[in-house]
Amino acid sequence: MNMKLAKSQKVLVVEDEGLIAHDISSRLLALGHEVIASVATAEEAIEKASEADIVLMDIRLDGRTDGIQAAATIRERHHKPVVFLTSHADRATLDRAKIAEPFGYIVKPLGPGSLHTSIEMALFKHRMQRQLEEREAWLQTILQSITDAVVVTDIHSRIVMLNRAAERLTGWVQPNARGELISKVVRLVSDDSENSAEDPVELATLRDSAVLLDSSAKLLGLGGREMAVEGTAAPVKVDGGTAGVVLTFRDVTARRWEERQIRQAQKLDALGKLAFGVSNDYLNLVGIIRHQADQLLRQFGDYSPARKAVDEIQQAASVAEQISRRLAVFGTRHASRPEVISLNAVLRRATKLIESVTGAKIEVSIRTEPATGRINADAGQIEQVILSLILHACTTMPDGGRMLIETGNAELPLRGRMHPYTLLAITYTGEEPDPDRLFEPSSTSEAGLALSEAHSLVNEHAGHLTAQRTAGGCCRFEMLLPRWTGKPLLPRPNWGGAPAILLIDDRDRIRVQLHNFFEANGFNLLEAADLNEALAVSQVHEGPLGLLIAEERLADAIANDLHRVHPNAGLLRVVDREETGAHEICRPFTQQQLLDRVQALLSRTESTASSGACQDSTPEQVK
């Protein structure tokens, strides 16, 4: 029977009996294999193994090292498959041989087909094992490189694996976490209670499907730091049964913080607009009431019974007028004179005033970090914000307490980038039932509008003002203002009523990149993925729209509808051919080249408008 293999293999024979080694070599040659060497010691086998595809190894060898130890070294150093040759088939030898993880075990004397079958099976198992090792290496690299935390557990909720992101968030390293209960490593608590949140691993196993983490779930990291997280838990199915659970989650604390700031700013902006509109209406009505009251007073004598009632009407109208004017001020932007100042210097100037405001019952400590960065702001308005925060804190401590005022530097991850800020924090021992609602107007009095006014002032300085409880039961105000870097501060989107730019592009990453770039250069870039979205954005946008950037076919399709809403908007077409004018830009281009073209077009529009000439931004003139 012809038992030659389709592919010849390089075989190393390790046998200290000369006749047996010669017989094995002859059989291998007859099967079509190449015997690269026949050696008698473990040391020679380890040295020659790198040249072979497979090693046939006798367990009992001359010398201090036997075949089992040599096989283990070859496997570790050269990753070659080893098949044992031995006349010893006792249980002790077999158990010891398993340590080297051989790919076969042939008992001497060799049978006619045993050598051929063992080599073929060993090589097949070796190929399968290498594929599994490569696949595992790929999976490990993927798991370690992704930014989401990944935790794998067995069916008993004990940790099998953590990736680097999970180690960073939980504070555990994989060797220490392996075998621990997941509830000990991934400490999830509910946002509205100090008790543990629902166990997502247990819930995923029970439902036999993927489940989302509770929306209020928080992760307790090292030092008790709380992080808002979101993610999923999914069961691992093997042969129809559950072998474990994979939990993935990410830290969304910064994102949710930013979302809260945006919601708070939008809420106060809406309230301000409403207050401004209502105050104007009421001022007109109050003016009529006061005028008519004056007319009645002139008609009544000094001792008329109705005079007292009219006096009260006039006094009430006067108070109503003051309230209406206060609401009007709350709903308008504040004129400011920004200059580069130091928060530490502002605090030093206000120290006497702070001491007089807090009084003797409140213990005040001021800690200024010498390296605190400077800010570009209106010093008077920043001092007003600080005093408003301090006055509010004092009202929560009528019987006395402690207050700490400190400065420093901070960085915030906003829109995917780290931004430098200067920090002023006020921590006090007063009780706040709901810190998240502190900046909402509580009444029309000066005190009721003070914190809302402070929030608006900080927001107009492109900063953030927050309030939260601390771990020690205190409340803490944090005012974050952009740190002065030596360059002119750039305004927020919707800056000063200047025209905005509308970009149409269906690629999310391109829109995000250009949005960040244009915003960093002081422009308000509006984004749309298609024509319908672009029209909706243009209709709801308040203020002028200076320019539309879109591919040629999209620009032509939207031009007429756009100019009905924004008649002075220009068009910049993105083309894949040679440019025919300033209103076309040919791909590929850099973001700086696009910015230069936008600035040139807007400058030209402004110059022609100021000279009274007809702008070149109408659809007919830019086509």
Image (spheres, helix red, strand yellow):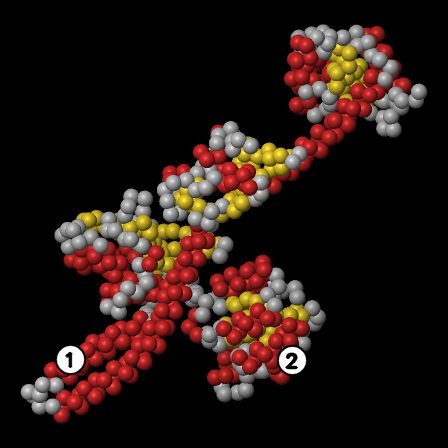
Find numbered disc 1 in the image and state the secondary structure of the residue it sits on.
helix
Residue located 16% across and 51% down the image? 399
Residue located 45% across and 41% down the image? 198
- Expressed as whole percent of the image width and height from the top left, the position of residue 429 reads 24, 49
Who is closer to the viewer here, 587 or 184? 184
Who is closer to the viewer here, 450 or 416? 450
**Farthest residue, direction left:** 303
186 vs 456: above or below: above
> Which residue matches tag 1?
312
Find numbered disc 2 in the image and state the secondary structure of the residue it sits on.
loop
**Farthest residue, direction right:** 1
- Could one spot residue 512 in this view of the protein? yes
Left or right of 444? Residue 146 is right
User: Which quarter of the image is occupied by the C terminus?
Assistant: bottom right
Left or right of 123? Residue 353 is left
177 vs 217: above or below: above
Instruction: Identify residue type, mark 2.
Output: Lys
User: Which quarter of the image is occupied by the N terminus?
Assistant: top right
> Which residue matches tag 2?
623
Residue located 63% across and 74% down the image? 555
- Expressed as whole percent of the image width and height from the top left, the position of residue 18 reads 81, 7
